[in-house]
């Protein structure tokens, strides 16, 4: 009987369809993935100020946000900080449909809304690891966050 499993496809479309909605039930945060490059500041003659273009939004939608490691202290004279590794998971169909091709240090993640942990919206997460399994249900990537630096976008 075990040999039949080898001959048959393990992840049939019926199996994927049956499980696809289960992980989505745990995706309680709304995230926004942006490019880190904001372009050059442009001088506005009317306001007399330089304006920085907004980051390009690559994707926005529901995600699961999970801390993966305990925060690490980084003693730096004048600015000791703590960083933590955080895992994000989004529906694989969304990653495929939007052609997401995330790159370490090139892309940023912000939490737009998180009813169960609203303070997540205060931080900017930097993509660090993007190699994912061939899982047919979720797209997983990891980020680092500096816990001592709050941002507003």
Image: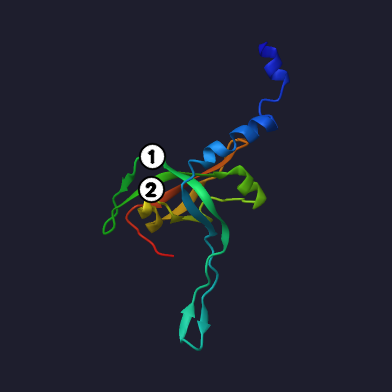
**Which residue is rendered at x = 51% and y = 82% of the image?**
43
In what element is the residue under mark 1? Answer: loop
Residue extending farthest top: 1
Q: Local crowd at mark 1 within 10 Å, few (<14), some, or many (≥20)? A: few
Q: Which of marks 2 and 1 is in front?
A: 2
**Which residue is rendered at x = 26% and y = 59% of the image?**
78
Name the one closer to the observer, 77 or 71. 71
Residue extending farthest bottom: 46
Q: Is residue 18 left or right of residue 43?
A: right
In the rendered view, tell whether residue 44 sits above or below residue 104.
Answer: below
**Which residue is rendered at x = 70% and y = 25% of the image?**
9
Quadrant location of the C terminus?
Answer: bottom left
On the image, the x and y values in percent for residue 128 come to 49, 47
In the rendered view, tell whether residue 100 sits above or below residue 5.
Answer: below
In what element is the residue under mark 2? Answer: loop
Q: Local crowd at mark 2 within 10 Å, few (<14), some, or many (≥20)? A: few
**Which residue is rendered at x = 40% and y = 56% of the image?**
121
| Numbered circle sitting on residue 116 | 2
Q: In this view, does 83 lie to the left or right of 36?
A: left
Distance between mark 2 and mark 1 Cα atoms:
20 Å
In the rendered view, tell whether residue 129 sits above or below residue 79.
Answer: above
In the rendered view, tell whether residue 66 sits above or below residue 10.
Answer: below
The residue indicated by pointer 1 is 69
């Amino acid at each position: 009987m075990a040999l039949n499993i080898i001959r048959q496809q393990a992840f049939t479309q019926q199996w994927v369809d049956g499980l696809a909605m289960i992980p989505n039930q745990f995706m309680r945060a709304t995230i926004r993935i942006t490019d880190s490059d904001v372009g050059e500041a442009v001088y506005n003659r009317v306001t007399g100020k330089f304006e920085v273009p907004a980051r390009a939004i690559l994707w926005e939608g529901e995600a699961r946000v999970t801390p993966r490691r305990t925060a690490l202290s980084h003693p730096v004279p004048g600015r000791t900080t703590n960083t933590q590794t955080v895992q994000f998971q989004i529906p694989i169909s969304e990653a495929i449909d939007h052609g997401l091709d995330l790159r370490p240090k090139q892309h940023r993640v912000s939490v737009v809304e998180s009813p169960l942990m609203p303070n997540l919206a205060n931080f900017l997460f930097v993509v660090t690891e993007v190699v994912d399994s061939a899982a047919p249900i979720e797209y997983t990537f990891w980020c680092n966050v500096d816990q001592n630096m709050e941002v507003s976008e």
